[in-house]
Amino acid sequence: MTMLQMNHSQTSPALLNVDNLRVCYGKVEAISNISIQVAPGSIVSVIGPNGAGKSTLLNAIIGMLPSRGEIHYDGLTINDLEVEERVQAGIALVPETRELFADMSVQDNLLLGSFRRYRARDKQYLDQLDWVYQLFPRLKERHLQAAGTMSGGERQMLAIGRALMGKPRLLMLDEPSLGLAPLIVKEIFQIISGLRETGVATLLIEQNARAALQVSDYGYVIETGSLVLEGQAGALACDPKVIETYLGIGKSRKADVVVPLPVA
Ligand SMILES: Nc1ncnc2c1ncn2[C@@H]1O[C@H](COP(=O)(O)OP(=O)(O)OP(=O)(O)O)[C@@H](O)[C@H]1O
Ligand SMILES: [Mg+2]
């Protein structure tokens, strides 16, 4: 494995520390000894081609798939926790499929994201709803609209908003730009970038490497279940292999097309 730069999160203890993760589907190994870290409040991207194991990685971290190796979150080893307990600890996953309730309103979909608080009569869910509406004014405008009639970009905002209703400290997004028009992709990435200021850390899975690296602090490249490259996002974006394979431009072109945003 080529390491462009290591120790990215050793200055502050990692919020998420995945150590030598292995995931198998039957006898087939989908993830082989992957180690990744996410520092508190940072944005970390995992990029890689179809079938590389990106969704498998997120599903194992949230506990939907059995795995070997160690997953540490906020100083705790969470390997033996159920999905619900990991969510309660502050990890949220927006899956590739979004999983919204099409017939329910935008607001009801959001409220489902804080169902535990709602059930416990903890009025904090109302503050959380206000916060999500501040982040996504369009969801507020359309709070009575059925989720299934929202546009693709709005549905993605709703899926992210619902995940944020649970007050996570680690938000995991599986291909948020999938199937969206470029202008909406830009808007979604601006929102993701803005989340950094709220203290939420984001682990971002993307095939849109250019947009992902632009908003990220750090990045990992995985291919066929293994880490092949990692580094500061700006350095990764200038790596010839990344440029050729993931940024879709020839080696002869200058690498400075990707300008990382300043870290807050
Ligand atoms: N339930 C499953 N049973 C068996 N194999 C699976 C299962 N889910 C995924 N796989 C296989 O594991 C590998 C990794 O799949 P995964 O969905 O994690 O890839 P990905 O990087 O998310 O791809 P994409 O970019 O297409 O979403 C693939 O070879 C896939 O066929
Ligand atoms: Mg996937």
Image (cartoon, rainbow, N blue to C red):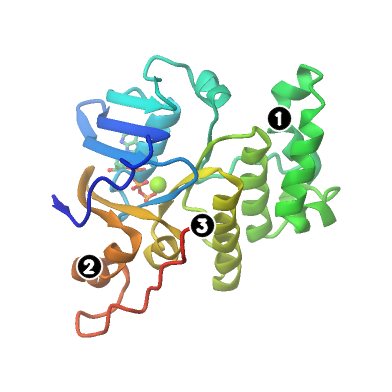
Location of mark 2 (residue): 239
Q: Is residue 104 visible?
A: no
**Mark 1 → mark 3, Cα distance in angstroms:** 28 Å
Q: Disc 1 or 2, which lies upstream in sequence?
A: 1
Residues at marks 1 and 2 touching, judged by CB atoms closer than 8 Å: no
Q: Residue at x 76, y 52 (%)?
A: 134
Q: Residue at x 44, y 27 (%)?
A: 74
Q: Quadrant of residue 53?
A: top left
- Estimate the x, y position of residue 62 in percent, counting from the top left: 45, 29
Is residue 98 rendered to the left or right of residue 228?
Answer: right
Badge 2 density bin: few <14, some 14–19, many ≥20, Cα 10 Å = some
- Estimate the x, y position of residue 133 in percent, counting from the top left: 77, 49
Badge 1 density bin: few <14, some 14–19, many ≥20, Cα 10 Å = many
Is residue 160 rendered to the left or right of residue 96?
Answer: right
Q: Disc 3 or 2, which lies upstream in sequence?
A: 2
- Residue farthest to the left, as pictured: 1
Is residue 85 rendered to the left or right of residue 27?
Answer: right
Is residue 80 rendered to the left or right of residue 33?
Answer: right
- Estimate the x, y position of residue 167 in percent, counting from the top left: 64, 34
At label 2, the amino acid type is Asp
Q: Quadrant of residue 208?
A: bottom left
Q: Residue at x 51, y 57 (%)?
A: 264
Location of mark 3 (residue): 264
Q: Is residue 166 visible?
A: yes
Please identify, in this view, whether the residue under mark 3 or under mark 2 is nearer the observer: 3
Location of mark 1 (residue): 114
Secondary structure under tag 3 reads loop
